[in-house]
Image (cartoon, grey):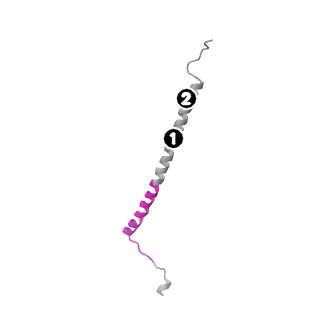
Amino acid sequence: MNSSKAKIKVIKKRDINISKKPEIDEMKKKKEPAREMVSNVSNWVNDLQKRKREETKIALEQLFPKQPQTDSL
Protein backbone atom coordinates (compact mmCIF):
# COMPACT_ATOMS: atom_id res chain seq x y z
CA MET A 1 0.00 0.00 0.00
CA ASN A 2 2.87 2.40 0.53
CA SER A 3 3.73 2.43 -3.15
CA SER A 4 0.36 3.98 -4.10
CA LYS A 5 0.92 7.06 -1.93
CA ALA A 6 2.75 10.08 -3.33
CA LYS A 7 6.24 10.56 -2.02
CA ILE A 8 7.05 13.88 -0.39
CA LYS A 9 10.57 15.22 -0.33
CA VAL A 10 11.38 17.49 2.60
CA ILE A 11 13.71 20.35 1.73
CA LYS A 12 15.15 22.30 4.60
CA LYS A 13 15.47 26.07 4.36
CA ARG A 14 19.27 26.01 4.54
CA ASP A 15 19.39 23.52 1.63
CA ILE A 16 17.36 25.89 -0.55
CA ASN A 17 19.80 28.78 0.03
CA ILE A 18 22.79 26.61 -0.81
CA SER A 19 21.22 25.37 -4.04
CA LYS A 20 20.38 28.89 -5.28
CA LYS A 21 23.86 30.40 -4.86
CA PRO A 22 25.57 28.46 -7.68
CA GLU A 23 22.81 29.48 -10.09
CA ILE A 24 23.26 33.15 -9.24
CA ASP A 25 27.04 32.87 -9.55
CA GLU A 26 26.70 31.20 -12.94
CA MET A 27 24.33 33.91 -14.14
CA LYS A 28 26.76 36.60 -13.03
CA LYS A 29 29.59 34.83 -14.82
CA LYS A 30 27.54 34.75 -18.02
CA LYS A 31 26.32 38.34 -17.73
CA GLU A 32 29.74 39.91 -17.12
CA PRO A 33 31.27 38.95 -20.51
CA ALA A 34 28.05 40.00 -22.23
CA ARG A 35 28.15 43.39 -20.50
CA GLU A 36 31.78 43.78 -21.48
CA MET A 37 30.98 43.05 -25.13
CA VAL A 38 28.09 45.52 -25.10
CA SER A 39 30.36 48.14 -23.55
CA ASN A 40 33.04 47.55 -26.19
CA VAL A 41 30.59 47.78 -29.06
CA SER A 42 29.00 50.90 -27.57
CA ASN A 43 32.43 52.51 -27.31
CA TRP A 44 33.18 51.62 -30.94
CA VAL A 45 29.91 53.14 -32.09
CA ASN A 46 30.50 56.30 -30.06
CA ASP A 47 34.04 56.65 -31.43
CA LEU A 48 32.81 56.16 -35.00
CA GLN A 49 30.05 58.74 -34.55
CA LYS A 50 32.51 61.20 -33.03
CA ARG A 51 34.93 60.80 -35.95
CA LYS A 52 32.12 61.19 -38.47
CA ARG A 53 30.95 64.39 -36.77
CA GLU A 54 34.48 65.80 -36.76
CA GLU A 55 35.00 64.91 -40.42
CA THR A 56 31.64 66.46 -41.35
CA LYS A 57 32.47 69.62 -39.41
CA ILE A 58 35.83 69.97 -41.16
CA ALA A 59 34.24 69.37 -44.57
CA LEU A 60 31.55 71.99 -43.93
CA GLU A 61 34.11 74.51 -42.72
CA GLN A 62 36.10 73.99 -45.93
CA LEU A 63 33.02 74.40 -48.11
CA PHE A 64 31.63 77.36 -46.22
CA PRO A 65 34.44 79.38 -44.64
CA LYS A 66 33.52 81.69 -41.76
CA GLN A 67 34.98 84.79 -43.39
CA PRO A 68 33.58 85.71 -46.78
CA GLN A 69 36.11 85.40 -49.56
CA THR A 70 36.69 88.44 -51.72
CA ASP A 71 37.65 88.38 -55.36
CA SER A 72 41.15 89.73 -55.82
CA LEU A 73 40.85 90.32 -59.57
User: What residue range appears in magenta?
Assistant: 8-32
- The disc, 2 or 1, on the residue closer to the chain's N-terminal end is 1
Q: CA distance from mark 2 to mark 1?
A: 18 Å
Q: Residue 7 appears at what percent x and percent y?
A: 46, 79
**Which residue has dot 2 on it?**
58
Q: Is residue 56 magenta?
A: no
Q: Residue 34 appears at what percent x and percent y?
A: 48, 53
Q: Residue 23 appears at what percent x and percent y?
A: 43, 63
Looking at the picture, does residue 50 appear above or below residue 66? Answer: below
- Locate residue 15: give its quadrant: bottom left
- Secondary element at tag 1: helix
Which amino acid lies under the numbered mark 1 shown in the image of this protein? Asn
At 50% from the left and 40% from the top, the residue drawn is 47
Looking at the picture, does residue 52 appear above or below residue 12? Answer: above
Q: Residues within 10 Å of mark 1 (few under 14, many from 20)?
A: few
- Locate residue 70: give its quadrant: top right
Which amino acid lies under the numbered mark 2 shown in the image of this protein? Ile
**Which residue has dot 1 on it?**
46
Q: Residue placed farthest to the right in the image? A: 73
Q: State which quarter of the image contains the C terminus.
A: top right
Between 18 and 34, the residue placed more toward the observer is 34
- Secondary element at tag 2: helix
Q: Is residue 10 left or right of residue 50?
A: left
At 56% from the left and 18% from the top, the residue drawn is 67
Q: Is residue 23 magenta?
A: yes
Identify the main secondary structure in magenta: helix
Q: Are marks 2 and 1 in contact (CB under 8 Å)?
A: no
Q: In the image, which is nearer the foreground, mark 2 or mark 1?
A: 2
At 38% from the left and 66% from the top, the residue drawn is 18
